[in-house]
Image: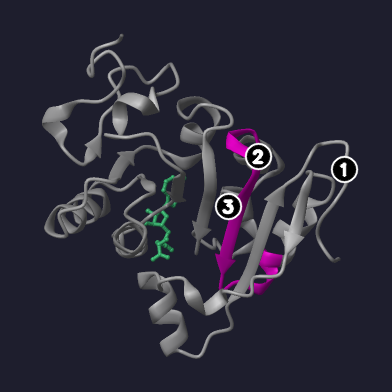
């Protein structure tokens, strides 16, 4: 059996997951103390949502992915203060993590909550959701796994819907919209009365064309 270091987990780092090798998929069996349903939060920010979910569902594992060091520290600190053993935070670009660092079929739920909006047209190419990104997230999901996307940006939401056409996801009705803990950005947008747009998708077999009410 691989030791923790070669498996990509540095015990010394505690909650922060620092892969020993950034060029191979992480061995999740070595990252979390026990195998369980795994949810990822892509762009987890300060970890408020991640930690609230991990507290609510101690039987599940949660991995936050975030590129900014300060936010990674906030998320790790928050998880540590709550004494959570089922949370890890990885500092890396989400698109890199979904393409190269996470094993295919390993994720039960991928959350993408308030991705950076890049509202100016000339900046749209910086938006994280592309066809390639959607395909990479789909690859990561276990059969029947869910991809949950939330944004306050109507035009981004519509462009995401368009990108999902033919991507072998079935859209589900999120009857639990208010059941999820609020993210820090969501609290802020709700306080401003901004509309919140939701997509809850379930991975389906690729022969079945599904998705997106256009
Ligand atoms: C608008 S904030 C939302 C944070 C959190 N999800 C929330 O709802 O409170 C977007 C977050 O995604 C992170 N982010 C943006 N692009 C990223 C990328 N390519 N990889 C990882 N994190 C990213 C940002 O640093 C920021 O923390």
For the N terminus, give its image quadrant.
top left
Asked if the beta carbon under badge 2 is closer than 8 A to the nearest atom of ligand 1, the reply is no
The location of residue 196, given as percent across then percent down, is: 57, 78
Q: Quadrant of residue 197?
A: bottom right
The mark that comes first in sequence, 3 or 2, is 3
Q: Which mark is residue 143?
A: none
Instruction: Point out the stretch of residues depicted in magenta.
Output: 138-157
Residue bearing the label numbered 2: 138
User: In the current view of this chain or complex, which residue is farthest to the top?
Assistant: 1
Count every numbered label the image shows and give the total: 3
Q: Please rate how many residues cluster around mark 1, counting C-alpha atoms within 10 Å: few if below 14, some from 14 to 19, many from 20.
A: few
Closer mark to the observer between disc 3 and disc 1 = 1
Residue bearing the label numbered 1: 208
What residue appears at the point 45 percent right and 21 percent down from the top-left corner?
Answer: 25
Magenta segment: does it hold 141?
yes
What residue appears at the point 31 percent right and 64 percent down from the top-left corner?
Answer: 48
Q: Quadrant of ligand 1?
A: bottom left
| Badge 3 element | loop
The location of residue 122, given as percent across then percent down, is: 63, 56
Closer mark to the observer between disc 3 and disc 2 = 2
Measured in 3D between alpha carbons, the distance from the residue under mark 3 to the one under mark 1, in whole angstroms, is: 27 Å
The location of residue 208, given as percent across then percent down, is: 87, 43
| Badge 2 element | helix
Measured in 3D between alpha carbons, the distance from the residue under mark 1 to the one under mark 2, in whole angstroms, is: 14 Å
Task: Look at the numbered discs 3 and 2 and tell me whether their residues touch, using CB distance below 8 Å.
Answer: no
Foreground residue, 142 or 153? 142
Magenta segment: does it hold 77?
no
Residue bearing the label numbered 3: 127
What residue appears at the point 36 percent right and 50 percent down from the top-left corner?
Answer: 59
């Amino acid at each position: 059996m691989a030791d923790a270091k070669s498996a990509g987990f540095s015990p010394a780092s505690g909650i922060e997951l620092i892969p020993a090798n950034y060029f191979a998929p992480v061995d999740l069996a070595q990252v979390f103390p026990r195998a369980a349903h795994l949810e990822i939060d892509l762009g987890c920010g300060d970890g408020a949502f991640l930690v609230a979910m991990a507290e609510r569902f101690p039987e599940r594992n949660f991995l936050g992915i975030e590129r900014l060091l300060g936010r990674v520290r906030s998320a790790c600190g928050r998880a540590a203060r709550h004494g959570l053993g089922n949370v890890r935070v990885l500092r890396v670009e989400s698109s890199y993590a979904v393409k190269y660092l996470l094993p295919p079929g390993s994720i039960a739920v991928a959350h993408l909550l308030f991705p950076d909006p890049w509202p100016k047209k000339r900046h749209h190419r910086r938006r994280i959701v592309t066809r390639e990104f959607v395909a990479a997230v789909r690859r990561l999901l276990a059969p029947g796994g869910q991809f949950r996307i939330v944004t306050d940006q109507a035009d981004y939401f519509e462009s995401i819907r368009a990108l999902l056409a033919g991507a072998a996801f079935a859209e589900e009705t999120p009857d639990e919209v208010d059941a999820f803990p609020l993210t820090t950005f969501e609290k802020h947008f709700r306080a401003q009365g901004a509309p919140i747009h939701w997509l809850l998708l379930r991975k389906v077999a690729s022969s079945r064309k599904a998705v997106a009410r256009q």
